Amino acid sequence: MEKIKVFAPATVANVGPGFDVLGLAIDGIGDELEVIKIDNGIKINPISGFEDLPVDPKKNVIGVAIQALLDETKLSNGFEINVKKRVMPGSGLGSSASSSAAAVFAVNELLGQPYSRQELVKFAMEGERCASGKAHADNVTPALLGGFTIVRSYTPLDVVNVPYPKDLHVVVVHPQIEVKTSDSKRILKKDVSLETAISQWGNVAGLIAGLATENYELIGRSLEDYIVEPIRSVLIPGYDGAKKLAMENGALGCSISGSGPSIFALTKGKATAEKIGTAFTNYYSSLEIDHKVYLSAINAEGAKVI
Amino acid sequence: MEKIKVFAPATVANVGPGFDVLGLAIDGIGDELEVIKIDNGIKINPISGFEDLPVDPKKNVIGVAIQALLDETKLSNGFEINVKKRVMPGSGLGSSASSSAAAVFAVNELLGQPYSRQELVKFAMEGERCASGKAHADNVTPALLGGFTIVRSYTPLDVVNVPYPKDLHVVVVHPQIEVKTSDSKRILKKDVSLETAISQWGNVAGLIAGLATENYELIGRSLEDYIVEPIRSVLIPGYDGAKKLAMENGALGCSISGSGPSIFALTKGKATAEKIGTAFTNYYSSLEIDHKVYLSAINAEGAKVI
């Protein structure tokens, strides 16, 4: 195989209480990469619509993630990459993760699949380190594996899928104001009270149990985040109003997607997701804030050849 | 019905990373109560083998838990209680929870089941408040419900069962040195670093996912506790040696039961539990520390009529 086209989905990280640990993949939005074998080097062509993204492979998450894979394999293959970027940087929907995941997935295919999807996570994480200064895995894991994922441990890296009910849907609104992950991380406190941490992992336990046993009500009750949402939500215009609308329109729960500013709600069924999507659109239109709404089932596939 | 005999099992609270949230019920050890309707008042007869436990119903967990139930029902029934206490106070195996759970379960049966098992938890918690100063629910919940349980939230109280693989076994060693829950709580720090909390809820997520998907290896990898074990284990003689032996003999994981000093290990299958039980016995005999070993599948029933 000399070239390949791949897709990796946008993702919602944290998912309520699971800061830095939980994530899920969205259907219908993600980055597309065409990766072509060349003699040597990594050549990233200018990215249409995102001309300010660097094409230097040492500064672009795609180049960094591919190089991490090549460094471990001791291979010196070359690749040229054409990018159709659909996930907007700074949206809180795993923009860099989508590109990094797609890149290592494509290269792994072209090299004859030396790695499993789980093993690819650590290379894609180097893309995240390049984007935000920290090699976090909560977006790249669902972007590669699909579904609902847990980063159980970073040292050693241990990522697993959780089963989830098939009628679970996600609705996301992206108010188009950039929040850089690095800024958004900085405002978090270094310590939390043990009491608050206990409440948080009570919800983490409830959320995983609710997903695995298809208990929608338990999923909903467990989505509350006591640690990150109170701090980060103040950076997101209209957050409280949007969350109130989601809950009034039947959301199981609603919280910040990744570092924001995107807001996600989980629902049982597509109809409720659509209703909330309309409410989000009307609300942000009334605030005169540019925004996009995405409706989706959970993406079960993760990165894929297209 | 004028009288009833009931049993409520001993329990392991915390279960590795799930401090104040997770718990499981043990087979084969628990408190037995005979509860007899009388005209009025709560009369607790002296408890054989535990003559220093108070029989004043305002000071005994059984009386306090029953009174909490009667206060809510606005009933003024009287009950006389005979106790066969099998779970040693201060063992870390939910001694007070076993008595409290049995008491409210028995009274609920005698009154014609006005409450569900879940609803009985809040009354049994008042017994815990009497015993330790804090109305914790992580022992009374599995003592009432059986199985593996989550206290997702205290306000409002929300307790749920988690499915678990049927071949999961528990082996417990109780080095017979009293550790009072109130002392053991006092030495915990009020704050934890966000980084450590994230590692902890990564393991909580992994543990629940492992239980629900019958993934024994994931259960094992997730049992590590970064917050409580490093502080409390120093109070338990032989802790590091016992844990090392458990792991060498095939335990999935090993940690402190409740506030200790009991130590539990989870295993796949009874044979491994027996092997570890023998290793625990030999080890604590060599240290000349009195001890008891309990081997058990997970108790699926919780409190029951006998």
Image: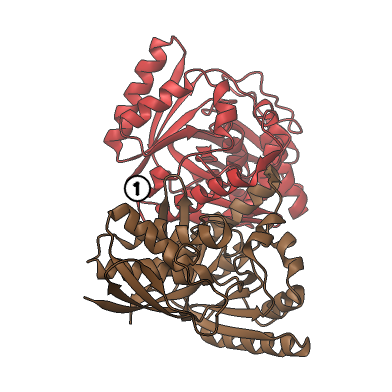
Chain colours: A brown, B red
Residue shown at 38% from the left, 22% from the top: B280
Q: Does dot 1 land on a helix, a strand or a loop?
A: helix
Q: Quadrant of residue B267?
A: top left
In-front residue for pair B153/A3: A3
Q: Residue at x 69, y 46 (%)?
A: A192
- Measured from the top left, where is residue A98 in percent x and y? 47, 71
What x and y, as percent, mark residue B171? 39, 32
Relative to the observer, which residue lies in front, A159 or B84? A159
Residue at image coords 64%, 74% = A263
Residue B269 in the image: x percent, y percent?
29, 41
Q: Chain of mark 1?
A: B
Mark 1 surroundings: few (<14), some (14-19) or many (≥20) residues within 10 A:
many
Q: Which residue is mark 1?
A: B216
The amino acid pointed to by label 1 is Tyr
Name the side, left or right, on which A22 lies relative to A81.
right
Judge from the rendering whether residue A206 lies leftward or rightward of residue A166; answer left or right.
right
Where is residue B91, by image quadrant? top right
To which quarter of the image does residue A45 belong? bottom left
